[in-house]
Image (tube, helix red, strand yellow):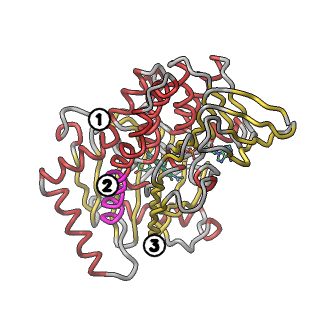
Amino acid sequence: MKSVRTQVVIIGAGPAGLLLGHLLQRGGIDTVIVETRSLEYVQHRVRAGVIEYGIANFLEDSGVGTRMRAEGLVHHGIEFRLDGVSHRIALSELYDGRAITVYGQQEVVKDLIANRLASGAPLYFEATVTSIEGHTTEHPSVVVATGEGDVEITGDYVVGCDGSHGVSSTSVPAGVLRRYERVYPFSWLGILAEAPPATEELIYCRHPRGFALYSMRSPTLSRLYLGVSPEETLDQWSDERIWEELTTRLMTDGGASIAQGPIVERAITPMRSVVVAPMRHGRLLLAGDAAHIVPPTGAKGMNLALADVRFLAPALVAGLRGDPRGLDSYSDESLRRVWRAEEFSTYMTQMLHPHPSDDFENGVQVARLRQVVESEDTARALARNYVNLSSL
Ligand code: RFL
Ligand code: PHB
């Protein structure tokens, strides 16, 4: 088997793996990134859209935020829509002028890949890590299946940035990691449509028929979501049914409706929360969705993934120079942030998704949402978490 040596092996070319590769390269560390999917697939996978204030600044300060600053949409508020009535939460007024940036995850990924390819540092697509060995030795290694046979890559550290279906957390012997999990009784049906956004700001809507979210990617592309039951499949949702349901849920008393257009992407995603702890076993470290998943209602998943590697990169640089303190505290410090994001994402989810059968829960949800739109203190707490949780 062919073998390769590097300092840090990075599994996965999502936002976490790619940003980590960039930060380590700036720190003078050699890395190899391996990604199971093709370049084309990774660059077009439609997912997150909201970048927090501190994370956007960090991307810019790291030299990979130029296009985000030029093309990203800066939003100073969001709307909550309850029973046909809209309530604006003035994020920036409530939180020292700070704002979020709406910029697609696949654009972040494209920017990071362009940067990596221009640097000449190794990044292999259609290369799948099939096993990880030697976690607790000085030189852990991975076996990568490629079109030209298996390759063994040995490093001083291996970082699992391989998302929620990756191999890194499952490579750890049973009993070492604990997995905390919650499954919610709904999924999100998400679409991308060639339609101009009907409003300037995101709308989170709680309607008796279910949750809806109006978001966007550009002045010509809308991104919309519907809360649906976990049993539902895409073949039950014709274009007509999707638009009808979105229109019904998002309608205001004043009759405001939404612009429609060709649907260019659609998917149903189950909602769940997962935390894997600790986020380290010997010289294997976990980052991003490989270690934690949040329901998307709080818009935290990509931000948390980027925040993990923001702190992991300097810890690895120091570790490779003989100072292990950052690596020793990486898991505990990350998990504090992760649990905070889980709390906020659960709060947002349970405020906005009507329960199918539990009307006591529904009464509590409406009371919670009314408190956000009626109490400035509650709205301010929400604004801080929504705009900047991953850097707090
Ligand atoms: P990723 O992006 O899943 O990347 C992991 C990569 O690892 C590869 N891989 C492997 N490579 C080699 N060998 C193996 N054995 C491998 N196994 C897997 C995979 O192919 C993949 O390329 O993880 P990362 O980098 O941790 O990034 C996490 C984010 O992708 C995720 O948290 C967000 O998309 C979540 N999310 C949102 N986050 C936000 O911050 N703001 C949002 O507005 C937001 N909206 C969303 C979301 C996620 C959604 N879905 C579809 C889950 C909206 C939705 C609908
Ligand atoms: C998105 O634009 O895709 C988006 C926005 C807010 C969320 C989740 C997803 O909470």
Q: Are marks 2 and 3 in contact (CB under 8 Å)?
A: no
Residue assigned mark 3: 185
Q: Secondary structure at mark 3?
A: strand
Q: Secondary structure at mark 1?
A: loop
Foreground mark, 3 or 1, reads 3
Q: Position of residue 164 (x, y in %)?
A: 57, 53
Residue drawn at x 38%, y 33% as measured from the top left: 55
Q: Label 2 vs label 3: CA separation?
A: 18 Å
Quadrant of the image for the N terminus? top right
Q: Secondary structure at mark 2?
A: helix
Q: Label 2 vs label 1: CA separation?
A: 18 Å
Badge 2: residue crowd in 10 Å (few <14, some 14–19, many ≥20): many
Mark 2 belongs to which amino acid? Phe
Mark 3 belongs to which amino acid? Pro
Quadrant of the image for the C terminus? top left
Checking the image for residue 99, the label placed there is 1
Q: Position of residue 42 (x, y in %)?
A: 64, 40
**Label 2 vs 1, first from the N-terminus:** 1
Residue drawn at x 38%, y 35% as measured from the top left: 101
Foreground mark, 2 or 3, reads 2
Mark 1 belongs to which amino acid? Ala
Foreground mark, 2 or 1, reads 2
Residue drawn at x 75%, y 39% as measured from the top left: 127
Question: Mark 1: is the Cβ under 8 angstroms from ligand 2?
Answer: no
Q: Is residue 71 left or right of residue 376?
A: right
Q: Nearer the viewer, residue 39 or 156?
A: 156
Q: Is residue 200 left or right of residue 380?
A: right
Residue assigned mark 2: 344
**Label 3 vs 1, first from the N-terminus:** 1
**Where does the magenta region start and end?**
339-352
Which of the 4 image quarters holds residue 282?
A: top right
